[in-house]
Amino acid sequence: MKILFTHNTAMWYRLPFFKELSKIYDLDLVFTHIGVMQEVYDENINNQIEGLEGVNYTILPNFHGFARGLISKARNSYDITIGGSWDTPQELFETIILYGITKIKKEPFIIWREDWDWEKDNNIKEKLLNKIIKYLCNHSDAILVPGTLHKEYFTKKLEVPENHVQIMPNVSNIKGNADITMKNHPIKKILYVGRLIERKGVIYLLEAYDKLKMENTELIIIGSGEEEEKLKDYVKEKNLNNVIFTGKINNEELENYYNESNLVVIPSINKGMGDPWVFVLNEAMYYYNPIIATTAVGAAPDMIEDNGFIVPEKDSDALKNAIEMILNDKKLEKEMSLKSKEIINNKFQYSNMINSFEECIKKVIKEYN
């Protein structure tokens, strides 16, 4: 089966997925906006992508934000085309073109997105965009989404038939030595990993830590970004003890922090958008960490069961209370640590992702024929 799979960029956690797909299908993988890696993660990608050896892929050049050569690719004959993005006007236009070409060729079109029903501006531009997205989604052959929040958005908000929306879990290619015994130390370590931007809500974590008043605790903040100085100023102003800013660190160092932490907090807020997923949950849970996440984290309903708490966004009191509940109860902390690892092992492996993808493909082909 020949598949045209368009995706914006080559995120490291996607590469094993694409590699496995290329073993099952005749995959024509096309990256349309490779520069997103530089913009979001400050990482460059060369023409030769490490991890995609043996995969048939193309990196399209951009001209004024448009992927040059996409139409030529789409005009070829495929059994299925997968794509879909509306993060920029150019990407929306490309999606409309892809959709239109597949319909002319009478070939199936599948959209893969991570949107959920976060708060949006109620203006004319947003309403018009919503109408276009709703049309595209309801006239595509299937929608692939990573979780339940996302499925609810497409089925309830955009009114896509439920049997046309398939959950394909988001998976991260975490490797390393996960050692729960490294958490046995006198200092309780609270860990945040991510960019230091307003949407990540780190200020609310600092407020919660200020209210915590627990002895023998340490808050470690890993990452960098435009809010860094503001957050450091807050720590000085409040005279907070045992708050450590590490800056951006490499993966080998990060493993030690995950192994030694007693819980990981993802305090995201809705700022123009919520967090579509947050792969820090996958990573933290792999290393036996209880999780506290807010309602602005897309992965939270699927990844947090009995291994942590989901709290309202922008609520430092709720964050503080959840941290206290875990750190004051050794038995609960241990149970949550083990549960995190169990969830990752059973539900968020590449085999789970591939199985969901294959199920979607088979369903689309059956209905299309």
Image (cartoon, rainbow, N blue to C red):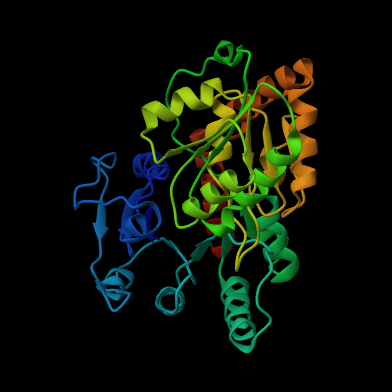
The image quarter containing residue 366 is: bottom right
Task: Say which of 40 and 109 sits in front.
Answer: 40
Task: Say which of 180 and 368 sits in front.
Answer: 180
The image quarter containing residue 117 is: bottom right
Residue that appears at 56% across and 44% down: 236
Q: Position of residue 82 (x, y in %)?
A: 45, 61
Residue that appears at 36% across and 34% down: 250
| Left/right of residue 128 with respect to residue 258 in the rendered view | right
Residue that appears at 43% across and 22% down: 176
The image shows residue 169, relative to residue 4, as above or below, that is above
Instruction: Name the quadrant of the C terminus.
Output: bottom right
Q: Position of residue 39 (x, y in %)?
A: 36, 60
Q: Position of residue 299 (x, y in %)?
A: 63, 46
Given the current orientation, which residue lies at the most extreme left position? 47
| Left/right of residue 216 with respect to residue 259 in the rendered view | right
| Left/right of residue 319 with respect to residue 270 in the rendered view | right
The image shows residue 165, relative to residue 130, as above or below, that is above
